[in-house]
Image (cartoon, grey):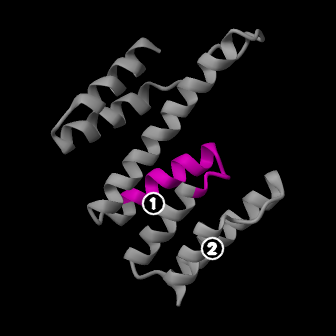
Amino acid sequence: VQAFEATLDQAVAETRAEKRISLYESALSLYGGEYLPDVDQEWIVPIRENLHQRYVNTMLNLSLYHLEQQEFRNALHWTQQLLDEDPCHEEAHRVAMRAHAGLGNRSGVARQFQVCRDALWEQIQVPPSPQTQSLYERLVH
């Protein structure tokens, strides 16, 4: 945990993009899943959630960086990693739709929107947000 957090802190402080990306990837490799999964006490819940949120945010940051660099396949890699962890993460679905659009893959955009819609409905019984629906409409029309 200390190595994971220290590496993330280094990444945030790093000014060189390539080094920051390398540090983010190193931090992700250190994440070993749920913190103390056998402990079932209240004090562990906020620590566990904080570490998991940092893990998820790091994958999102990597996907956004690659999207901005027009490295669409790398962006898709990190969004898929994130969505494997949290299938209802709408921002990751939006990044993936934009990456598919960047590759000229309109059917990929449509598939990603469908996966998003299905995950949200199956898990929490809500439709995609207006922001996600609007992005989908812009990308496929």
Query: What type is the residue that disc 2 sits on?
Result: Gln
| Identity of the residue drawn at 73% across and 9% down | 39
| Identity of the residue drawn at 37% across and 47% down | 62
Decide: is 52 above or below 1: below
Disc 1 vs disc 2: which is toward the camera?
Answer: 2
Q: Is residue 94 visible?
A: yes
Q: Is residue 96 magenta?
A: no
138 relative position to 117: left or right: left
Query: What type is the residue that disc 1 sits on?
Result: Leu
In primary-sequence order, the first of circles 1 and 2 is: 1
Instruction: Using the rendered view, name the quadrant where residue 102 is placed.
Output: bottom left
Instruction: Please give the label number shown on residue 120.
Output: none
28 relative position to 52: left or right: left
Pick the residue in front: 130 or 17: 130
SS label for mark 2: helix
Q: Which residue is identified by label 1?
A: 76
Q: Which residues are magenta?
A: 74-90
118 relative position to 92: left or right: right
C-alpha distance separating marks 1 and 2: 19 Å
| Identity of the residue drawn at 53% across and 90% down | 141
Q: Which residue is identified by label 2?
A: 133
Spot occupied by residue 56 in the image (x, y as percentages of width and height): 52, 39
